[in-house]
Image: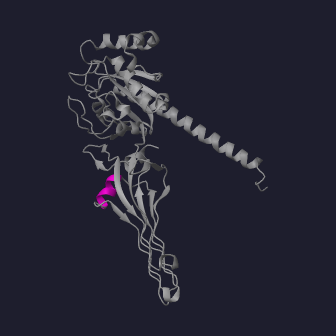
Amino acid sequence: MVLLFSRVLSPVKLKGGGTLLRDHLRIYVRGGSGGKGLEKYGAIGGDGGDVYLEVNESATLHALAKSNPSKRFIAGKGSDSGKFRIFGEKGQDLVISVPKGISVTADDGELLGNLDHHGDRMLVAIGGEGGSSKSSYGGLKGEPHIIRLDLKLIADIGLLGFPNAGKSTLLKALSRAKPRIANYPFTTVRPQLGMMEYEDGRQISVADLPGLIEGAYMNVGMGHKFLKHVERTYLLLFVIDIRGFQLNAASPFRSALENYLLLNKEIELYNPQLVDKPSVICLNKMDVKGADERSAKFLFDLEHIAEVKKQFPEEIIPKNISKPIEIVKISAKLQQNTDILKSVLRSAIDEIDDRRRERISMESLEKESQLLESDDYIY
């Protein structure tokens, strides 16, 4: 489940490990034109080729854009018919390789479908009909479309936090990734993928998602581009700056607990089911002065959140709050307790994997049982 992600989602390799991800691409697709018919003999031209998208484990959007800078993909033309060829041959289909986890939308935003598994295929442009009596023996043009390919990142763990919470520093501490790190918000502007490695060879992928801001669910600050990746992760790692956070002078200062509530609010408003994902809270920057007192208050207030939340503005309170598997206090900068965090994340992901395997096994048994009970089963 894990090693595969580094190959599929690694358009730009970063020095020292990790990847920078291209997560969307807008392309023009057109079916091939139909071949000409020949009225004298009633000959029919070949249909134009069709355009398909097909999931390939080695494909990336970056490679696709690089291989065809024009971003125009046109299938083959149908062959003309003739005196000795009554039926022209169909034009060659064009198959475009894409990574798994792709959502395909029309230019007007209509969802056309999802490509989530290796080998999944989708028809996106039909070739024109070959020339016949219906078209005065002239070949018809193929369908033209502009479509958008959106990659929803598939990773084991997604780092979720407001800008400058220390997500990039944490990714570096947990994996071999070398993300850009600086003491200002929005250091991460595109998703980055790192790989945690364990002594027994186990590998777990970690995605550093760009920092959210209030209103992300309404697409403020490109919120939808960031939140869409959360949907494809198995576990959420909330990274909270224990000092609190203030985006700018015009924004209100939010305490660590308020930040956690707001993160829950943003993902709940984007997709209520995200709050139910397994999660871990990481209280970061525990090396700063007063961190112990602040973390103690965070833990106490979270335990008594039903009462404590009444003192906060209603607009930051989510209907439901994610129930963390564990809360770990660390300093990513000094790599304090990062080994403990890695161990917690390993246990959580292993448990998720076990539950997924058990569910898949149960589904297989149910299908087999239904087949045995059906009239179509041959003994």
> Residue visible at 29% across and 39% down?
177
Q: Position of residue 369 (x, y in %)?
A: 72, 45
**Residue 79: quadrant of the picture:** bottom left
In reply to whether residue 120 is colored magenta, the answer given is: no
Position of 123 compared to 166: left or right? right
Q: Is residue 156 visible?
A: yes
- Front one among 283 and 152: 152
Q: Position of residue 34 (x, y in %)?
A: 44, 74
Position of 96 compared to 276: left or right? left
Query: Relative to residue 279, is residue 148 depicted above or below?
Result: below
Query: Relative to residue 320, is residue 148 depicted above or below?
Result: below
Rendering colour mode: one colour
Main SS, magenta region, reads helix
- Front one among 118 and 128: 128
Q: Position of residue 252 (x, y in %)?
A: 27, 19
The magenta-colored residue range is 61-67
Q: Is residue 119 visible?
A: no
Please identify the quadrant where the C terminus is shown.
bottom right
**Residue 360: quadrant of the picture:** top right
Q: How many marks?
A: 0
Query: Relative to residue 251, is residue 372 depicted above or below?
Result: below
> Residue visible at 32% across and 45% down?
21
**Residue 327: quadrant of the picture:** top left
- Front one among 192 and 123: 123
